[in-house]
């Protein structure tokens, strides 16, 4: 997924700010969509449109923090860069805790915003990829038989084939076959690989 | 001539009753007496009866009573002295004294006489005339008492009194002497002109009034001016002047009061009122600080972004000129925007503001709402304006009225803070109240004002807010009064209250 497929969504009630930001995005060839309010954005956004959200906090109606909460509720994975005309520490902490990418005060150096947007989009990319990988791993695990599943669990615990055979009342040869199937189905080449893969999906 | 007189004298000598007739017409009597303490009368005319109650026969040679006994004892010595000091200089004497009449109480008489010619063997003679002057004397005394009374009133008056003509002082009372720090009235009367009593910068105006008044032209009856004391100190005096008759000629009568202290107190009060109003404006600005910061950061952000974009385009080589122009236009626009906000803030933050000028209410209301909406909460409120078209201009201080309107809008928003956003509605209206005034209204649909709170509403330091000094409405009231208007409120028939204030039409 290249940056060109991603959109920067700008939500700010001030027209001058919106337009000037749109112009900047246009300049560096980023696709951009602007919205005057959080509600307008929610009405138009179709997940999972990738990119990032540049969001003001103080807006009439739904505030920026309210929008962030709503997106979390809807499980929308869109990194948020907050830009605010007047922020305090409390606001910033709340925003970051809820998972914001960054919190920038107006007026800002445009480079600062652009760097933040880039980072946000990369992070977004990475997270999306990790999610995809995780999902495919989960799918693969579904394809394991019950026996293969059991064997996998014990392999991860660090048990030797011999021990697994005894524990499961199988021949060592059978265990070796199950092990090979697990490695094949999960598309991993080594024990370390296997452990890493399984650990990763547990974190998602 | 002498012939006629001599002829008449011969007639009178032949007919003594003719002489008696003449003598009886005197409002008194003629006499010849011995120059002694008894006033021994040798001859006294018939008039004695009417004047003293004693007949000539009673008095001559003290038959019934000595003339001296009729004279009131207290006056005796004085009269004797007056007579004899005149006689010593061979002059006619004139003296006034009281007598006790037989039946009519006390009377006043005037005696005029001189040494008489005595025939051989007689002691020194006095001859003269005694006239009843009782009526005149009482009138004289009454006049004197009345004058004394008047004098004490004039002298004792705390109002300073000055009578002048042709710019010269004719009469001053003690209060004026004291007021101007002189030692006595004479010092002021001796001055060449009343110009010395007036502060130099005010002299021309006062001179103008005096001259106009004496000429019967218009001059104000009451006015204030700055006077100069003996030591040069300047005092502010209130003066009331009119034309009066003084010794047969016109003169100006002026009464004066020293109002220096009063003026200082008024000035001090006005200064304090200004300070309070200023404090209230600063307080409002303080409450709006966060919103203001946010509001200014918006145009700054836009300017910053546009500038960066422009620079990038230029750095990138062969920039799109149209886009550069758009960016520059935006920069200019946003700078103005920020400038206007700062301008409004500076106006509100200024300590002094007291300029009554012609104000267009429509413009003022719009500007005020624009500024008020910097506060997000007010932006969340639905504001409607109902201003009649072709509203006449009013005379007011625009910054002060702005302050009042801002206060009322903020209060109204506060009153609706617990309503859901969709129900928050505020109406600012203006219409002609009558021929001379315009009425501005701020209506909300909030929680209203309770009966108990109503009485204290315009008190200083009364507030139902968690923050804020509570000066708002009391200041608003004094401001509106100072702008010649009234501030009050009415309850709406459905929900909420309407605050109303009037301003004079220009």
Image (cartoon, coloured by chain):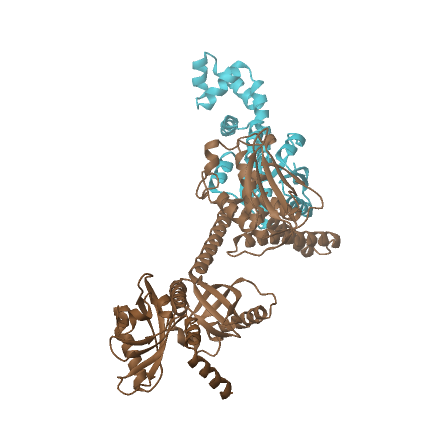
Chain colours: A cyan, B brown
Q: How many marks?
A: 0
What residue do we see at 47% from left, 86% from top? Answer: B6
- Image location (x, y in percent) of residue A82: 56, 40
**Depth check, front residue: A131 or B493:** B493
Left or right side of A109 for B71: left
- Image location (x, y in percent) of residue B170: 47, 73
**Depth check, front residue: B458 or B376:** B458
Left or right side of B347 for B436: right
Does the image show residue A69? yes
Outermost residue to the front? B14
Rendering quarter of residue B29: bottom left
- Image location (x, y in percent) of residue B449: 51, 33
Q: In the picture shown, does residue A180 fall above or below B4?
A: above
Rendering quarter of residue B61: bottom left
**Depth check, front residue: B53 or B37:** B53
Outermost residue to the top? A169
- Image location (x, y in percent) of residue B357: 62, 55
Does the image show residue A58? no
Left or right side of A179 for B55: left
Q: In the picture shown, does residue A107 fall above or below B464?
A: below
Q: In the picture shown, does residue A147 fall above or below B504?
A: above
């Amino acid at each position: 997924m290249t940056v060109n497929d991603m959109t920067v969504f700008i939500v700010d009630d001030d027209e001058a700010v919106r337009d000037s930001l749109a112009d900047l995005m246009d300049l560096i060839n980023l696709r951009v969509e602007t919205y005057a309010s959080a509600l307008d954005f929610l009405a138009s956004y179709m997940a999972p449109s990738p990119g990032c959200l540049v969001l003001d906090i103080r807006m009439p109606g739904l505030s920026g923090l309210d929008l962030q909460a709503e997106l979390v509720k809807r499980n929308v994975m869109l990194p948020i860069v907050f830009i605010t005309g007047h922020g305090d520490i409390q606001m910033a902490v709340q925003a970051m805790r809820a998972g914001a990418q960054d919190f920038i005060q107006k007026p800002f150096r445009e480079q600062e915003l652009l760097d933040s947007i880039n980072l946000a989009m990369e992070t977004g990319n990475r997270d999306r990829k990790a999610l995809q990988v995780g999902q495919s791993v989960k799918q693969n695990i579904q394809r394991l038989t019950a026996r293969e599943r059991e064997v996998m669990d014990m392999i991860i615990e660090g048990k030797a084939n011999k021990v697994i055979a005894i524990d499961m009342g199988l021949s060592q040869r059978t265990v070796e076959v199950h092990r090979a199937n697990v490695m094949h189905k999960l598309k991993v080449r080594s024990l370390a690989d296997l452990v890493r893969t399984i650990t990763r999906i547990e974190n998602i | 001539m002498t012939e006629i007189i001599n002829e008449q004298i011969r007639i009178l000598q032949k007919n003594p009753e003719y002489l008696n007739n003449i003598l009886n017409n005197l409002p008194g009597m003629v006499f010849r007496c011995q120059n002694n303490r008894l006033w021994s009368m040798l001859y006294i005319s018939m008039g004695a009866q009417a004047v003293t109650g004693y007949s000539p026969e009673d008095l001559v040679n003290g038959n019934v009573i000595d003339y001296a006994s009729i004279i009131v004892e207290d006056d005796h010595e004085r009269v004797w002295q007056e007579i004899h000091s005149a006689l010593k200089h061979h002059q006619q004497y004139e003296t006034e004294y009281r007598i006790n009449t037989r039946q009519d109480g006390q009377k006043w008489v005037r005696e005029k006489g001189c040494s008489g010619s005595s025939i051989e063997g007689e002691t020194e003679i006095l001859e003269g005339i005694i006239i009843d002057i009782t009526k005149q004397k009482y009138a004289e005394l009454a006049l004197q008492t009345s004058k004394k009374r008047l004098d004490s009133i004039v002298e004792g008056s705390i109002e300073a009194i000055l009578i002048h003509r042709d710019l010269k002082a004719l009469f001053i009372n003690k209060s004026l002497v004291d007021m101007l720090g002189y030692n006595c009235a004479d010092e002021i009367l001796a001055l060449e002109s009343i110009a010395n009593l007036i502060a130099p910068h005010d002299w021309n105006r006062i001179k103008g009034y005096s001259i106009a008044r004496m000429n019967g032209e218009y001059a104000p009856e009451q006015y204030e001016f700055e006077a100069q004391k003996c030591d040069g100190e300047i005092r502010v005096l209130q003066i009331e002047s009119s034309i009066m008759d003084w010794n047969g000629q016109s003169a100006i009568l002026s009464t004066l009061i020293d109002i220096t202290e009063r003026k200082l107190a008024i000035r001090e009060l006005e200064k304090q009122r200004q300070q309070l109003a200023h404090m209230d404006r600063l307080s409002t600005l303080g409450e709006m600080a966060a919103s203001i910061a946010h509001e200014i950061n918006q145009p700054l952000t836009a300017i910053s972004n546009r500038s960066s974009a422009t620079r990038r385009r230029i750095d990138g080589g062969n920039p799109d000129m149209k886009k550069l122009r758009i960016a520059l236009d935006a920069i200019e626009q946003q700078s103005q925007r920020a400038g206007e906000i700062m301008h409004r803030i500076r106006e509100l933050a200024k300590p002094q503001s007291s300029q009554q000028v012609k104000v267009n209410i429509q413009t003022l209301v719009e500007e005020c709402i624009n500024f008020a909406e910097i506060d997000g909460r007010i932006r969340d409120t639905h504001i409607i304006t109902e201003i009649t078209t072709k509203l006449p201009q009013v005379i007011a201080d625009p910054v002060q009225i702005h302050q009042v309107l801002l206060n009322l809008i903020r209060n109204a928003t506060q009153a609706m803070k617990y309503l859901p956003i969709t129900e928050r509605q505020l109406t600012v209206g203006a219409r002609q109240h009558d021929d001379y005034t315009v009425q501005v209204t701020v209506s909300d649909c909030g929680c209203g004002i309770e009966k108990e709170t109503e009485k204290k509403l315009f008190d200083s330091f009364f507030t139902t807010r968690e923050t804020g000094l509570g000066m708002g409405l009391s200041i608003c009231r004094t401001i509106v009064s100072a702008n010649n208007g009234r501030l009050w409120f009415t309850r709406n028939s459905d929900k909420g209250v309407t605050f109303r204030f009037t301003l004079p039409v220009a």
